[in-house]
């Protein structure tokens, strides 16, 4: 390596000379660079002293060498990144051109069909007047059947590989016509914009039999690896309970035919699970592509009859599969088609959208497959950092175990040992028990250590209901961030103690369920697009009531949260957690509990849309608030909520645990009802406010006091209203651009009211506002300034506070240019609370 060094010759003239490093010198510098790319001046001088071969080089020259080396490394990374982006764009361009050709064919076909229908409309009346005989009608019907014959397949059994191969080839042709042809009219899914960094091109169909979804995407794995991952459906399809390959038949063209039996979980307690009996065909195409296609074997298609299981509804897979093409420069281009008939008529009418929505199918199967492949690709390339000292595959296994355990609890299959207990006369909560905990917790769990000598099992209390106008993502996000609004610390302590095999009494629920401490969220891992989070929740030990016999230490939960993106159409939102101990071993037993909220497609054109099992409509609580206007039709939606909580029990305490679990689930339902009322967008209107304590003013009165006090103290109007009506003032306050909030005049002030900007700044909701203390959001300098100005506020009525930094309820720093505090007076001029206004705030 050579470099130019500026210096002066003997005559004082500036001169430049080249310094050429020897290979030994470069090797020594590279060793240091690998440890520290940017060494300090002292470290460079130390390097010259410790390495004799660098003694003839000046420290400034070594500094320049490191600068050049960092620049070359940056250029190399940028060149590599641009090459990767270029490959992606080239492949995506090819994919979009193919999609464009397919759409042009579809348009041509639609134009032809439109012209044919116009011709039929014009010719039909004349034909009807010339010949209306029965013979003519029958003849025309026979002609139509000849033009569109119904395929008839001879009966084929497992002993006839040639017959199964014929079914496989038919399946392959039908699948390819859906994946790259015009057999199905695909419509791009809302919010799925194609691009080099997007998940892919996602489309659904609204006018085919059953429900269908299609995806095209790029991944950096080779086709054979992609095929291996996709065939292992249980690893990425969370609704897959089991998948058994009962027969494998090699074909003459190098492919394989498999006969598969698969069981899937029901998403809620209100419907039965599904099972499938399918033929899967894996083969290669002449262009080097791999194809995995699948369809159900039914009497109409031919083939052997499959196994059956009680309490399962047989559903059908219509020709579906995966087309995996190799890309130039490495990687694969994937086409996925999922087309199923889930027998929606076997479920209650109100739940049919769960089985008739192509968006839900796309999120649960099609997009899930692409995301899983991308996750594996990033893990293989080392782009995913390890969390908590564990490899990504181990953390992914934890996520699968949590999801599977929750599904097992919701479904309660008899072959897992579940049986129902008699109810207490009210059918709102179902109680099921299983005396086979090893099957639920895992074969590695030592049952006698959990249920020592007297024996025991696992008990599950579960309930499902429908919600009206409650965004699933918003509800689950609130439940995650504000556990104190619905959880009971005694129940959490009981769950944790039971898994430690420690003696612990069955708790009694308190009327003010919750805990006095706080929760700390410790991130472990997240998926590529942040649609799923795995985290450890620490519940601080000081939050438990000292008068009760509880664990003296902090409690820990392993938690899985998914579907909190409000823009993901049809996505299921889920919060699942299980108690763990401090050791958190890889094979730790997990007993998951939690919530699942699945959106139902809105049926605004049906009178039954308002006739639901709505939680919110039966509540008698104070009004709540939200940020969206009431007339936003996009939030005229329904969703189904499923709650399931699991507990271990000892045989002699089973009835006590059942009573506790039933009461606890009912209390959680009541809490969720209050939350649903608060965050429902339809509640905003004239009901902005919160559930005030007795004697507190309602929102209209408080707004008038805030505005009048500000005018009296400063001589300036806070709210420029056209009229003095309460409704007008409330709207102006709620939509004010600055964060305006009120806190109580107590030794430890807590917030009692805020406008929408204040909710955004504090990252909270009205119902959780009273849990936030003023001292928690102000930094040290802010608290000092407020203390120094407090007397002035109480005497003069207001004070201006300088710019500063505060914290949201989630711990994020928020900067503001100026703040103002003033004393809010009632109608009789007595102090009611303090009001704050944070001007031009923003997250740092």
Image (cartoon, helix red, strand yellow):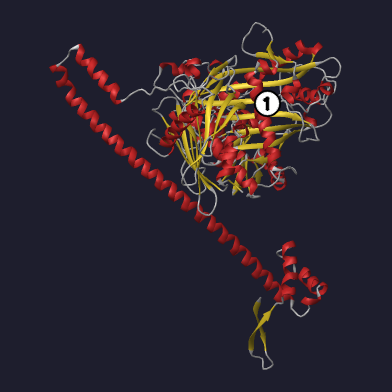
From this viewpoint, which residue is outermost toward the top?
425
| Left or right position of 330 against 652 | left
Question: Where residue 389 appears, x then y in whole percent?
Answer: 75, 44
At x 67% / y 7%, what residue is drawn? Answer: 424
Relative image position of residue 120 (x, y in whole percent): 21, 26
In which quadrant of the rendered image does the N terminus lie?
bottom right
From the viewer's perspective, is residue 376 above or below residue 596? below
Q: Position of residue 810 (x, y in %)?
A: 66, 39
For the residue labelled by badge 1, is the local secondary structure a helix, a strand or a loop?
Answer: helix
Q: Is residue 64 above or below residue 175?
A: below
Residue holding disc 1? 405
Say whether residue 39 is visible: no
Q: What is the number of callouts on the image?
A: 1
Between residues 677 and 409, which one lies in front from this camera angle?
409
The quarter holding residue 59 reads bottom right
Q: Furthest residue to the bottom? A: 11
**Does the image show residue 315?**
yes
Q: Quadrant of residue 241?
A: top right
Q: Quarter-wise, where is residue 615 in the image?
A: top right
Q: In the shown orientation, is residue 139 left or right of residue 805?
A: left
């Amino acid at each position: 390596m050579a470099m130019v060094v500026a210096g002066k010759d003997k005559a004082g003239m500036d001169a430049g000379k080249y310094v050429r490093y020897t290979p030994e010198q470069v090797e020594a510098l590279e060793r240091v660079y690998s440890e520290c790319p940017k060494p300090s001046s002292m470290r460079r001088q130390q390097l010259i002293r410790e390495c004799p071969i660098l003694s003839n080089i000046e420290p400034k020259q070594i500094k320049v060498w490191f600068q050049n080396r960092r620049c070359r490394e940056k250029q190399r990374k940028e060149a590599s990144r641009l090459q990767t982006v270029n490959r992606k764009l080239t492949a995506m361009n090819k994919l979009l051109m193919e999609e464009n050709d397919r759409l042009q064919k579809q348009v041509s076909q639609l134009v032809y069909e439109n012209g044919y229908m116009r011709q039929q409309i014009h010719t039909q009346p004349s034909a009807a007047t010339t010949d209306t005989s029965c013979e003519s009608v029958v003849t025309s019907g026979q002609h139509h059947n000849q033009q569109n014959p119904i395929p008839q397949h001879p009966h084929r059994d497992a002993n006839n590989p040639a017959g199964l191969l014929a079914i496989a080839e038919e399946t392959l042709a039908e699948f390819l016509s859906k994946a790259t042809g015009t057999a199905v009219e695909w419509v791009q899914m809302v919010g799925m914009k194609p691009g080099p960094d997007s998940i892919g091109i996602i489309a659904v169909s609204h006018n085919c039999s059953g429900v269908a979804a299609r995806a095209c995407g790029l991944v950096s794995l080779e086709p054979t690896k992609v095929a291996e991952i996709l065939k292992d459906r249980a690893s990425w399809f969370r609704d897959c309970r089991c998948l058994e390959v009962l027969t494998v038949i090699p074909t003459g063209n190098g492919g394989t035919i498999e006969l598969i039996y698969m069981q899937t979980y029901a998403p809620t307690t209100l419907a039965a699970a599904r099972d499938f009996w399918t033929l899967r065909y894996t083969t290669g195409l002449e262009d080097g592509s791999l194809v995995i296609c699948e369809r159900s074997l039914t009497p109409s298609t031919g083939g052997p009859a499959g196994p059956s299981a009680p309490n399962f509804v047989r559903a059908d897979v219509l020709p579906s599969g995966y087309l995996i093409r190799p890309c130039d420069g490495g990687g694969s281009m994937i086409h996925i088609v999922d087309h199923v008939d889930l027998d929606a008529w076997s479920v209650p009418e109100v739940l049919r959208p769960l089985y008739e929505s192509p968006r839900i199918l796309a999120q649960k199967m099609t997009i899930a497959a692409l995301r899983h492949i991308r996750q594996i690709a990033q893990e293989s390339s080392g782009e995913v950092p390890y969390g908590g000292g564990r490899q990504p595959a181990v953390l992914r296994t934890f996520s699968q175990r949590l999801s599977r355990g929750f599904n097992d609890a919701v479904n309660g299959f008899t072959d897992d040992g579940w049986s129902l207990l008699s109810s207490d006369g009210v059918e709102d909560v179902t109680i099921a028990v299983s005396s086979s905990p090893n099957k639920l917790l895992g074969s590695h769990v030592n049952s006698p250590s959990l249920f020592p000598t007297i024996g025991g099992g696992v008990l599950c209390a579960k309930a499902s209901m429908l919600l009206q106008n409650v965004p699933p993502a918003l509800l689950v996000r609130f439940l995650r961030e504000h556990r104190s609004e619905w959880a009971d610390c005694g129940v959490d302590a009981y769950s944790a103690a039971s898994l430690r095999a420690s003696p612990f009494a069955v708790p009694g629920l308190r009327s003010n369920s919750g805990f006095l401490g706080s929760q700390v969220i410790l991130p472990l891992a997240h998926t590529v697009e942040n649609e799923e989070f795995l985290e450890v929740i620490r519940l601080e030990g000081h939050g438990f009531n000292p008068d009760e016999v509880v664990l003296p230490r902090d409690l820990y939960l392993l938690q899985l949260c998914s579907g909190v993106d409000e823009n993901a159409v049809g996505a299921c939102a889920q919060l699942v957690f299980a108690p763990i101990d401090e050791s958190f071993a890889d094979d730790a037993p997990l007993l998951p509990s939690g919530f699942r909220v699945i959106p139902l497609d809105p049926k605004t054109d049906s009178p039954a849309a308002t006739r639901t099992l709505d939680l919110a409509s039966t509540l008698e609580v104070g009004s709540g608030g939200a940020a969206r206007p009431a007339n936003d039709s996009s939030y005229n939606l329904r969703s189904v909520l499923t709650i399931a909580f699991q507990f271990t029990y000892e045989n002699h305490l089973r009835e006590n645990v059942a009573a506790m679990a039933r009461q606890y689930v009912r209390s959680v339902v009541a809490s969720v009802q209050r939350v649903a009322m608060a965050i429902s967008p339809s509640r905003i209107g004239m009901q902005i406010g919160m559930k005030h304590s007795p004697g507190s003013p309602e929102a209209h009165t408080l707004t008038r006091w805030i505005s009048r006090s500000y005018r009296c103290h400063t001589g300036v109007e806070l709210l420029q209203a056209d009229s003095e009506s309460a409704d007008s003032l409330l709207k102006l306050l709620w939509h004010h651009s600055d964060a305006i909030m009120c806190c109580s005049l107590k030794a430890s002030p807590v917030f009692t009211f805020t406008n929408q900007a204040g909710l955004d700044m504090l990252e909270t909701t009205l119902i959780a506002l009273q849990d936030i203390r003023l001292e928690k959001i102000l930094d040290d300098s802010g608290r000092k300034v407020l203390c120094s100005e407090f007397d002035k506020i109480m005497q003069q009525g207001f004070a201006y506070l300088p710019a500063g930094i505060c914290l949201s309820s989630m711990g994020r720093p928020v900067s503001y240019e100026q703040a103002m505090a003033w004393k809010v007076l009632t109608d009789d001029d007595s102090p009611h609370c303090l009001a704050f206004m944070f001007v031009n705030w923003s997250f740092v």
